[in-house]
Amino acid sequence: MKVVFLGATRGMGRSLARLMAARGDRLVLLGRDPEELRRSAADLEAAGAPHVSTVSCDLLNADTFEPALADAARQLDGAFDTVVVTAGIFATQDALERDAALRDRVLTTDFTNTIHFCEAARTALLAHGGGTLCVFSSVAGDASRKPVIIYGAAKAGLSHYLNGLDHKFRAEGLATVLVKPGFVRTSMTAELPEPPFAGDPDDVAKTVLRAIDRKTPVVYAPPVWRFVMLVIRNLPRAVMRKIGF
Amino acid sequence: MITAPPILDARGASVPLGRIAGWGRSPVVEGREIVSEDLVRSTRFASLTRGLGRSYGDASLPSSSERLVAGSRLADRILAFDPSTGLLRAEAGLSLHALNRLLLTRGWFTPVTPGTQFVTLGGMVAADVHGKNHHSAGTFGRHLEALRLRTGSGEILDVGADSEPELFRATQGGMGLTGHILEVAVRMQRVPSPWILAGVETAPDIETLVERLRAAGREWPYTVAWADFLRDDGRGILVKGRWATPDEAGIRAFEWPGSVGVPFDMPNWVLGGPLMRVFNRAYYLANGIDARTAIVHPQPFFYPLDAVRDWNRVYGRRGMTQYQCVLPSACGAEAFRTLIRIARSHDSSPYLVVVKDFGVEGEGLLSFPRPGITFTLDFPVSERTTQRLVDALNDFVASTGGRIYLAKDAFTRAEHFRAMEPRLAEFAAVRDRWDPERTIRSAQSVRLFGDAA
């Protein structure tokens, strides 16, 4: 595969990029911090990637998206066939209620600009006959829960958008893989209390890579979260008002 | 890429209070650990860095719940690997488990490995770990090229044999007290195949066991022995090994095995006498058939207990401690019987004792190994006996000129430690130069080095 990866330097993105590198996929890493990109590129080369290069791209600045994707295509002999987006930010509901600037940053990053980025990626992929667009949303977008109201709303909107993309463009050759991670032990969740069914990034990466290869439209990782969310979605309103999760 | 910056203020005040323990699960303290890919940032306000928490006692625990600990395990990138020289440079949180999976099938292995893969490079430096090849390869520190540290005063600097050599030496075996280890550069060892050619011998008593251990060490790069502590004679088995040549290994598909977990804390009676007697006897018999050699996988050879995740839960909630000492060669095998006598007189009997001969002393200022024989004893922690037992063992070890391994220790008293460590003043001088305020400290350094909590 020829992969453009936004978010490979950390967390689940780091794990997934390593699996791709180990099996010989060619990678272009997009990100904001050149030093971070350089270090991750070295790591992925050691993991076995035949090609890793880096391109500057800031998810908070939508003007950087099209040039970054064009630059990435040039580094992959003109075109790429897969785009992965794992970048995103998390903040607790408390912090988001208190801090309007943080709220704006989370909504812009996780919803508005991720959609702008996906639109640019979609256009680039379709121009070369399609491919796969894999984007990390969250189970937080599946049900309105007290600890993740605002973050969950951004992810719900993102999931909604990605499902629509798949409906509209699959026939034209563009497969959308919507990833819904449950609670995964990363630096993003290190400060949160750990619920049951918590997963590890390396296991999530395996699940997601299989989904990318099979072009599965929606994948929960760890897979058990599909059933966890099914239960939560079906809890009566009176219960959701009572419980804390 | 944008991921969540750890949400914390300059003092990390929003990091929630959790419980932190070493591998022995005793002691357990309250503390705040910041786990981040960005170790350079997370060490800025931390008083200590910890890796995978595989030291048994309190070496990786904060000196007080007010002090932040930086968790390094997500800072795990390889920054450079040169397959023509084997020189590896990586972030300090890279685990040996990941490194083995990446490099062994390409013909490279860590020059020194401890008995578990669930350690970070930073932890291996801080404890200056040794392995079955100590008699031939020394400690991990011998194979280091350079380190990047954040010193107690906050400065980031690269150290090596040619650059701040005193700080470089003090950091090897310095239990993380000389600076936060950010990056490690180490020379990997070329191996001819991923397989081990191993042999087993038995010995009827401890004298013969030690003698055969030394003899085997003259021909084999890896040796180790187990003695049956439940018997007075100290009969035991000896395992020796080396990397197999491609011819010896033949055509075998190499894969790393998975692991199974211990799902819950075992009740305390499981480790009681009769069951362990049966186990020790079975171990001896199973291994005592003959002295032939066989091609074995490196995982059971180097890491027999890694196949069982969380095996420390076997010891139940009260936790365990491991006592590891080295006694000068002059003490002879008789010392083993003294250790047995001391343990029995304190109503404690370890089940298996690991026995290993050490080669020359390393460069690290507080590096544990020195020429002699090391004994490793496991005990369940008991409020009634453990402290008195460790005191008695330390009386004996100090009297022989031996010393203990800080990566295992949770019970040694400062006065015993001082009696065993003539090198302490030199170590303190390095800390005085780089961290006069003792910004970096641990629960262990409070207990043994006289740091303030």
Image (tube, coloured by chain):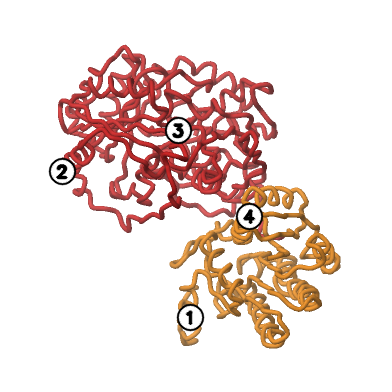
Chain colours: A orange, B red
Query: Considering only vertical position in the picture, is B104 above or below B126?
Result: below
Q: Is residue A122 visible in this depiction of the protein?
A: yes
- Residue sitting nearer the eye, B264 or B130: B130
Q: Nearer the viewer, mark 1 or mark 3?
A: 1
The answer as to whether the residues below labels 1 and 3 share one chain is no
The image shows residue B174 at horizontal and vertical percentages of 52, 28
Chain ID for label 2? B
Front residue of A233 and A65: A65
| Pointers 2 and 3 within a single chain | yes
**CB-based contact (under 8 Å), mark 1 and mark 3:** no
Callout 1: 10 Å neighbours few (<14), some, many (20+)? some
Q: Few, some or many C-alpha atoms within 10 Å of disc 3 (few <14, some 14-19, many ≥20)?
A: many
Circle 3 sits on which residue? Answer: B444
CB-based contact (under 8 Å), mark 2 and mark 1? no
Is any atom of residue B68 visible in this view?
no
Q: How far apart are marks 2 and 3 (CA)?
A: 36 Å
The residue tagged 2 is B278
Residue type indicated by callout 4:
Pro
Three-letter code for the amino acid on which mark 1 is drawn? Ile
Circle nearer the viewer, 2 or 3:
2
> What's the amino acid at mark 2?
Val
For numbered disc 3, what is the local secondary structure?
helix
Disc 2/disc 1 C-alpha distance (Å): 50 Å
Which residue does the image show at 36% across and 23% down from the upper left?
A: B357
Q: Is mark 2 on a helix, strand or loop?
A: helix
Residue for point 67% across, 75% down: A154
Which residue matches tag 4? B6
Q: Which of marks 3 and 4 is nearer the N terminus?
A: 4
- For the image shown, how many numbered marks are present on the structure? 4
Subunit under mark 1: A
Q: Which residue is drawn at 68% across and 84% down?
A: A170
